[in-house]
Amino acid sequence: MPVRVGSNGFGRIGRNVFRAAYASQADIEWVGANDITDPETTAHLLKYDSNYGPFPGQVQATDTGLRVDGKELRIFAERDPAALPWGELGAEVVIESTGLFTDRENASKHLEAGAKKVVISAPATDPDAQIGPMINIRALDKIARHVEDALAHGARVLAGGKRLPELGPHYYAPTVLADATHEMLLCGEETFGPVVPLFRFDDEAEAIEAANNTPFGLASYFYSQDLRRIDRVSRALEAGIVGINEGALSSEAAPFGGVKESGYGREGSKYGLDDYLSIKYLCQGNLA
Ligand SMILES: NC(=O)c1ccc[n+]([C@@H]2O[C@H](COP(=O)([O-])OP(=O)(O)OC[C@H]3O[C@@H](n4cnc5c(N)ncnc54)[C@H](O)[C@@H]3O)[C@@H](O)[C@H]2O)c1
């Protein structure tokens, strides 16, 4: 039996969940989407994605939404999630990806409307669960490989450290590891899972040296109440983004990007426009 999924918001995240379900041929039936954008624009945005390329199937706008490979996809234009026909459509999971209904009270409106579960695509307030399954088995295998490698190099498990098959094939327990060292894979490769390795250090210089001892430099985070230390450490960290007493630091108004092997250029902010602009140099002389 396919899982019946709908989305509130058919923007970047909503469309990409739809694309991922389409591309993986997962056993998912899309029951409908809700977005206040008109179907013509939505069809265009689904067809042409500057990051992921053209949609691999046929997409047309209709009066009621989209037709994808000849199959109707209803798109509602309803501002109140409680008024969506999720019950009638048999929606089991609603992807809440408007960015607007991220707290328990508002996301629950989808449940009132008849959905069985809601996945909120953004940091949520007071949800039932913060950590869900990994995207696929490869992601889970990578986490397991990193944890096994860390244990082989002397790490100790303080919490988690195992798969949770009783919840489903893609769950890994949130894990905290003590005695992490720089030889471990999780120090050089992105684990992309719920694993926190703890490293010991004696002073600020040692912490900075360890943090910079990587070919990568996207984001760094540190915690301090000392303004002098904040100034010193944020200058010394080799990263494009530094979080100071703050972990959720992405914002459309701030430049997102790294240094070293974490790439060139920036997304977001006015600097995000640089890649789309051509510089024209005018050299004017001899004006009488
Ligand atoms: N989980 C992740 O990895 C991740 C990554 C990027 C963004 N996000 C979060 O997901 C959310 C959506 O991000 P996005 O990039 O898809 O944004 P987006 O702006 O591309 O999409 C939001 C969509 O919601 C629609 N919308 C606005 N108001 C609505 C309403 N009242 N009812 C129905 N639809 C409405 C908009 O028309 C738009 O199409 C944001 O909160 C963002 O922070 C999560």
Image: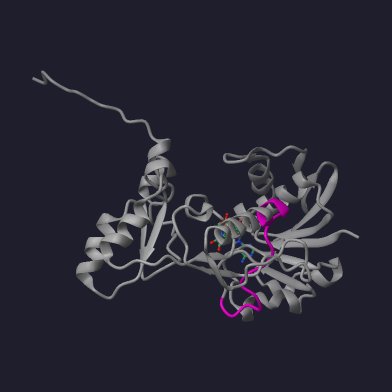
Of 160 and 180, which appears nearest the observer? 180
Taking the image in four quarters, ligand 1 sits in the one at bottom right
Residue, x 79% and y 71% (percent of image)?
166
Tell me if residue 11 can be seen. no
Side of 95 relative to 126 (left or right):
right
Quadrant of the image occupied by residue 94: bottom right
Residue sitting at x 25%, y 56%: 235
Q: Is residue 129 magenta?
A: yes
Which residue is situated farthest in the right direction here? 1
Which residue occupies the foreground of this view, 106 or 144?
144
> Main SS type for the magenta part?
loop
* Residue 115 is inside the magenta segment: no
Q: Horizontal and vertical percent for residue 120?
A: 63, 68
- Above or below for 21 versus 124: above
Number of marks = 0
Visible residue check, residue 238: yes
Residue at 76% over, 62% down: 6
Colour mapping: one colour
Q: Position of residue 208 (x, y in %)?
A: 31, 58
Q: Where the N terminus falls, by quadrant?
A: bottom right
Residue drawn at x 63%, y 69% as measured from the top left: 131
Q: Position of residue 220 (x, y in %)?
A: 39, 58
Q: Which quadrant of the figure has residue 50?
A: top right
> The magenta stretch spans which residues?
125-140
* Viewer-closest of 7 and 235: 235
Location of the C terminus (image quadrant): top left
Query: Is 12 in front, or is 226?
Result: 226
Give how far across and how far down residue 68 sits, in percent. Answer: 79, 44
Residue 200 shown left or right of residue 230 in the figure:
right
